[in-house]
Amino acid sequence: FYCLPDNYQIIHNPSLHDISDALHPKFTPLEISQLDKKAELALDLFGKRYLPGFVGLNNLKKTDYVNAVVQALAHVRPLRDFFLQL
C-alpha cells in the first residue's frame, strides 16, 4: 500500500489486513473443495446474508453481456477453482 499524495509505502500495518484480504482473497484447497458442499449463509459487512462463492457484479453502463458471461463462467467449477487458487 502507498500513501498518496506523498507516495510512501506503508509496510506491516495491521489495520490494512482487512483491505488486503478483500482486494486479494486467498483460499485454501480445502475451502475451495467445500464451496459446493457448504449451504450455510455468511454475512457481509452490512449484515446481509449471502451464499459464499456467488457474488453479483455492478453494471457499468453497457456491460450487461460481459457480466452475464463472467457469471456463467464463474459457475464452471474447474474454471472457478483454478482462479480461486491464484
Image: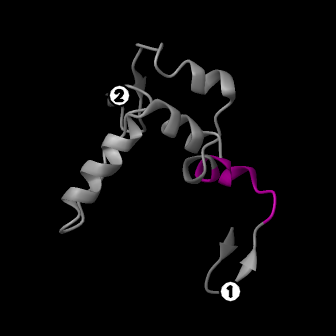
Please, what secondary structure does the residue beneath circle 2 have?
A: strand
- Which of the pair 72/51 is nearer the observer? 72
Q: CA distance from mark 2 to mark 1?
A: 39 Å
- Residue drawn 39% across and 19% down? 41
Task: Name the image quarter holding the N terminus.
Answer: bottom right
Q: Which mark is residue 6?
A: 1
Q: Which callout, 2 or 1, points at the residue further toward the start of the chain?
A: 1
Residue position for label 2 = 50
Tell me which amino acid carries mark 2: Tyr
Q: Which mark is residue 55?
A: none
Q: Quadrant of residue 3?
A: bottom right
| Residue 13 located within the stretch drawn in magenta | yes
Residue 66 placement (x, y as % from top left): 28, 58
Task: Point out the stretch of residues depicted in magenta.
Answer: 11-20
- Residue drawn 31% across and 41% down? 72
Tell me which amino acid carries mark 1: Asp
- Taking the view exactly as shown, the residue that stands out farthest to the right is 12
In the image, residue 77 above or below residue 23: above
- Taking the view exactly as shown, the residue that stands out farthest to the bottom is 6
- Which of the pair 80/58 is nearer the observer? 80
Q: Is the stretch drawn in magenta largely helix, strand or loop?
A: helix
Side of 79 relative to 27 (left or right): left
Side of 71 relative to 34 (left or right): left
In the image, residue 47 above or below residue 39: below
- Residue drawn 35% across and 28% down? 50
Residue 61 placement (x, y as % from top left): 18, 68
Residue 71 placement (x, y as % from top left): 32, 44
| Residue 54 located within the stretch drawn in magenta | no
